[in-house]
Image (tube, grey):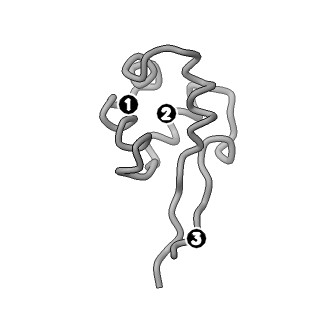
């Protein structure tokens, strides 16, 4: 049986970055730009480091930035 996974709310990330380039957004929250790119393009899921970086940089709740998806 497959386990549920997390997906990122791209609309919230767009709102948080306020039009700045993704690389600057990544630097602002303290993660690698490649991490942001992989998450945005669905190549990886948001991990605890990414989630913590967003939560400690912006006044958002976890449920604002990630959604639990049931595995198919």
For label 3, the SS is: loop
Closest to the observer: 57 or 4?
4
CA neighbours of label 3 inside 10 A, class few (<14), some (14 to 19), many (20+): few
- Disc on the earlier residue, 2 or 1: 1
Task: Give the Cα distance between marks 2 and 1.
Answer: 7 Å
Task: Give the Cα distance between marks 1 and 3.
Answer: 27 Å
For label 2, the SS is: helix
Name the residue tied to disc 1.
31
Residue displayed at 41% across by 43% down: 39
Name the residue tied to disc 3.
70
Labels 1 & 3 near each other (Cβ < 8 A): no
Please state which of the two labelled residues, at mark 1 or mark 3, is closer to the viewer. 3
For label 1, the SS is: loop
The residue sitting at the front extreme is 41
Labels 2 & 1 near each other (Cβ < 8 A): yes
Image quarter for residue 49?
A: top left
Give percent across and percent down for residue 40: 44, 40
């Amino acid at each position: 049986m497959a386990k549920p996974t997390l997906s990122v709310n791209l609309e919230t990330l767009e709102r948080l970055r306020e039009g700045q380039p993704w690389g600057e957004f990544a630097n602002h929250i303290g993660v690698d730009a490649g991490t942001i790119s992989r998450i945005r393009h669905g190549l990886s899921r948001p991990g605890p480091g990414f989630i913590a970086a967003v939560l400690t940089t912006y006044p958002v709740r976890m449920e604002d930035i990630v959604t639990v998806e049931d595995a198919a």
